Amino acid sequence: MTEATIIDGKAFAAKLRERVGAEVRRITDAHGLKPNLTVILVGEDAASQVYVRNKGIQTEEAGMESVTHRLDASTDEATLLGMIEDLNADPKCNGILVQLPLPDHIDESKVLATIDPEKDVDGFHVINVGRLWTGQNALVPCTPYGCLMMLKDHFGSLSGKRALVLGRSNIVGKPMAALLLNESCTVTVAHSRTADLEERCREADILVAAVGRPEMVKGDWVKPGAVVIDVGINRVPAPEKGPDKTKLVGDVDFGEASAVAGAITPVPGGVGPMTIACLLRNTLVAACRQNGIDAPDL
Ligand code: GUN
């Protein structure tokens, strides 16, 4: 039986996109500035193609300019770095996103370090990582920022809450921990080597699961009434739907956890839609900062 409030990320993201769109119109009218997001995709990874297409569509729907460079999987590192340097120098480009993962022959950390931190709408450059951890004005990674927005909407203040982040990736786990710490949560980062993992999870008022393991977090890992944010997007076989059918599940066993939690994000329709909405928000913020315009508080 579902007792938890379902946090509707799809609706939340739609509202954020509307607010971003309204601000873009205001800034375009007042300053003649149309924010530009440029995405670089190297290779033919199927999931990346879908993400990049959706980014382009939603960027234009928000009234911004979208440019996508699709490069062959065999593109060499120097060519990619040269393209990023050209975009850094182009005042019309406000946001640069290099879709990950990159082919093995390209050094990801070198690529991320080449992006101008002021155009780093992913928030992956070490300058933005450092700003985030020191509480300065960073461009913040989109998925954890989306999680934070939903948590603040649910709780109001997060001050003093016990938060557990399951997963320590640079894209989600670590920046999520920094954001929660900046909101005065008491933060634990747990991972595959954490001792007494289930007990640590049960102590949390806020449980963010970002490990990429289908339905790993069971109902009895969840503190009654806790808020559960499920970042996982895992495609698994769904024989109940027919032979060769698949479905998306999160890192949390939704059926079990939703009977215990106070609120929970579903998969799909929870965290996922927030990522691109936050990317649009970051692009708008970056464009404003680059042009000396007060960035809207979105
Ligand atoms: N691949 C999966 N998630 C992301 C993301 O948030 N940004 C980029 N650039 N690539 C990704």
Image (spheres, rainbow, N blue to C red):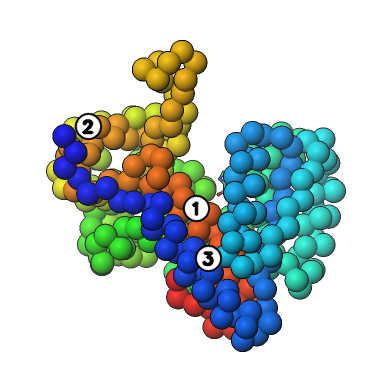
Name which residue type carries label 3: Arg
Q: Are marks 1 and 2 in contact (CB under 8 Å)?
A: no
Q: Position of residue 87 (x, y in %)?
A: 77, 63
> How far apart in space, not on screen, are marks 3 and 2 (Cα)?
34 Å
Q: Is mark 2 within 8 Å of ligand 1?
A: no
> How far apart in space, not on screen, are marks 1 and 2 (Cα)?
26 Å
- Picture disc at residue 232: none
Q: Name above or below for residue 71 compared with residue 298.
A: above
Is residue 211 visible to the viewer in this orientation of the structure?
no
Q: Secondary structure at mark 1?
A: helix
Q: Quadrant of residue 260?
A: top left
Farthest-out residue, bottom: 30
Q: Is residue 30 left or right of residue 189?
A: right
Identify the residue under disc 3: 281
Q: Name above or below for residue 285 compared with residue 164.
A: below
Q: Residues within 10 Å of mark 1 (few under 14, many from 20)?
A: many
Q: Secondary structure at mark 2?
A: helix
- For the C terminus, give its image quadrant: bottom left
Query: Mark 2 or mark 1, which is nearer the start of the sequence?
Result: 2
Residue found 73% across the figure and 53% down from its top: 68
Identify the residue under disc 2: 256
- For the N terminus, give its image quadrant: top left
Name which residue type carries label 1: Thr
Q: Position of residue 7 (x, y in %)?
A: 30, 51
Identify the residue under disc 1: 275
Q: Position of residue 170 (x, y in %)?
A: 52, 47
Q: Is mark 3 within 8 Å of ligand 1?
A: no
Name which residue type carries label 2: Glu
Query: Mark 2 or mark 3, which is nearer the start of the sequence?
Result: 2
Q: Is mark 1 within 8 Å of ligand 1?
A: yes
Residue found 57% across the figure and 65% down from its top: 62
Query: Mark 3 or mark 1, which is nearer the start of the sequence?
Result: 1
